[in-house]
Image (cartoon, rainbow, N blue to C red):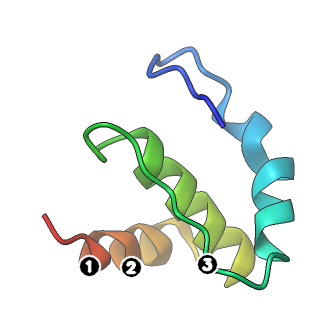
Amino acid sequence: MQMADKSSFDVLGLSKQIEEWIHIPENVLIHCALGQSRSVTVATMFLMMKEKLSLVEAFSKVKKGRTC
């Protein structure tokens, strides 16, 4: 999936795609060039939807899982 790294990009429009990923039995790799905005946003949305976490809980989990 291609995402423009612009503040005008409709991230909420990704929710249908993320919902499809939730039902994939394999792991899903989410990445971008710097891993600072788009991938973090998608990973946070994924956790909020799949694990029913709040924004703060999901973002905290993503932040703890980063290796850099």
Give the amino acid at mark 2. Lys
Mark closest to the chain's N terminus, 1 or 3: 3
Mark 3 is surrounded, within 10 Å at the Cα level, by few (under 14), some (14 to 19) or many (20 or more) other residues, namely few
The quadrant in which residue 8 appears is top right
> Where is mark 2, residue-wise?
61
Up-down relation of residue 60 to residue 7 (above or below): below
Which amino acid type is shown beneath numbered disc 1?
A: Lys
Q: Which image quarter is the N terminus in?
A: top right
Instruction: Give SS at disc 3.
Output: loop
Q: From the viewer's perspective, is 12 left or right of 8? A: right
User: Where is 60 relative to 55, above or below?
Assistant: below
User: Which residue occupies 44% across, 22% down?
Assistant: 5
Q: Which mark is residue 64?
A: 1
Identify the mark nearer the N-term, 3 or 2.
3
Q: 8 above or below 20?
A: above
Task: Depth check: give the residue in front, 38 or 7.
Answer: 38
Label 3 or label 2, whichever lies nearer to me, is: 3
Q: Which mark is residue 56?
A: none
Residue beneath label 3, please? 27
Residues at discs 2 and 1 in contact (Cβ within 8 Å): yes
Q: Amino acid at mark 3?
A: Asn
| Disc 2 packing (10 Å; few <14; some 14–19; many ≥20) | some
x, y percent for residue 39: 45, 49
